Amino acid sequence: MIFYFTGTGNSQMVAETIAKYIDDRAYSITGAMKRGAYDYALGIDEPVGFVMPTYYYGIPVHIPEFIEKLHFDHTPRYIWTCLTCDGLTAGAGGMLDQILRQNGYIPSARFSCPVVNNAVVMGGQMPVRNVDALLDRAQKRSANIAAYIRERRMGNFDDCAGMGADFITQQHYGRYKNGRGTRHFVLRDSCIGCGICAEQCPADAIAVGGGKAQWVKDKCYYCLRCINNCPERAISYDGQDNTYTFMNNRVEGEP
C-alpha cells in the first residue's frame, strides 16, 4: 500500500512505478483527504510506503495531518518513505520519519528520487531540457527502490540529503511552513474560467467566480499545479515569466 502526494505528477509517477514492480497499489493522499478516507485494511506482512515531494527541504505542510488521521487494522511491519526532489532532500527524510514515529509508526527504510525541478517559487521558471531522460532516470531509480522494498531492506538509502542536511532544512523550511501565501499567485487576462485549477487544487484554495479563477484561502500547499496545469498559462507566481511550465505526462487521473 503506497500513499503519494503530487503537484505536477512526479511523485505520482514514482509511486506508481514502484507499485508496478512490487505488485502494489498507489493511493492519492489528496484524494484520500478530500474523501475523508483514512481507514485501511492491510494484508499479512503488507508494506506501507509514503512518496512525496521535497518542499523547501522539508515535507508538504499537510502531511502530518494525514498521517495523524491514518489508521490501519493492524500495525504495518515494514514502512518505507521516498522523497522526490531536484537533487537535494536535506532534512526532509528525517522530518518525515519523525512524524511517523510520533504517530506510532516505525520507519524501516528511507529513499529519495531526483525528478524534474518545477520549483518556480525558488526563482522563476526555466526551460527544462532532457525531460524524457530525467523521467527515464527517475523510473529506473524507482525500479531499484522497488527491489529493495521487495527484499525488505532496512536503513537510510537517501543519498540526496547532502552535507548539513538538518541545518539546510532549518534555514529554509520556515519560509514555506509559515508562508505559502496565495497572494503571490497572479491571474492574467487570458484566464477563461475553465475551472481546472479549482477542481484539481489539493488545498481547495481556488474557486471560479465571475468567469475567472480566484483564491479563496490565504494559504495553500504551494504544489504549483495551478501554474503548471493551466491550459492558458494564465497563472504566474508574483508575475514571473510562466512560458515554461511542466506537467508529468507519464501519469493520469487525480493528483
Image (cartoon, rainbow, N blue to C red):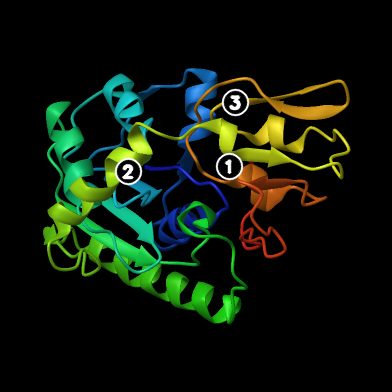
For the residue labelled by badge 3, is the local secondary structure a helix, a strand or a loop?
loop
Task: Residue 59: give its label.
Answer: 2
Question: Quarter of the image containing the C terminus?
Answer: top right
| Residue underneath mark 3 | 205
Vertical relation: 210 (above or below) 253: above
Residue 78 seen in render = no
Residue lying at 68% horizontally and 40% vertically, measured from the top left: 186
Q: CA distance from mark 1 to mark 3?
A: 15 Å
Q: CA distance from mark 3 to mark 2?
A: 19 Å
The mark total stands at 3
Vertical relation: 146 (above or below) 200: below
- Camera-near label (1 vs 3) is 3
Q: Quick check: 191 left or right of 201?
A: right
Amino acid type at image mark 2:
Ile
- Residue count near mark 3 (Cα–Cα under 10 Å), binned few <14, some 14–19, many ≥20: some
Residue lying at 28% horizontally and 39% vertically, measured from the top left: 174
Q: Quick check: 211 left or right of 80?
A: right
Amino acid type at image mark 1:
Pro
Residue lying at 44% horizontally and 54% vertically, measured from the top left: 15
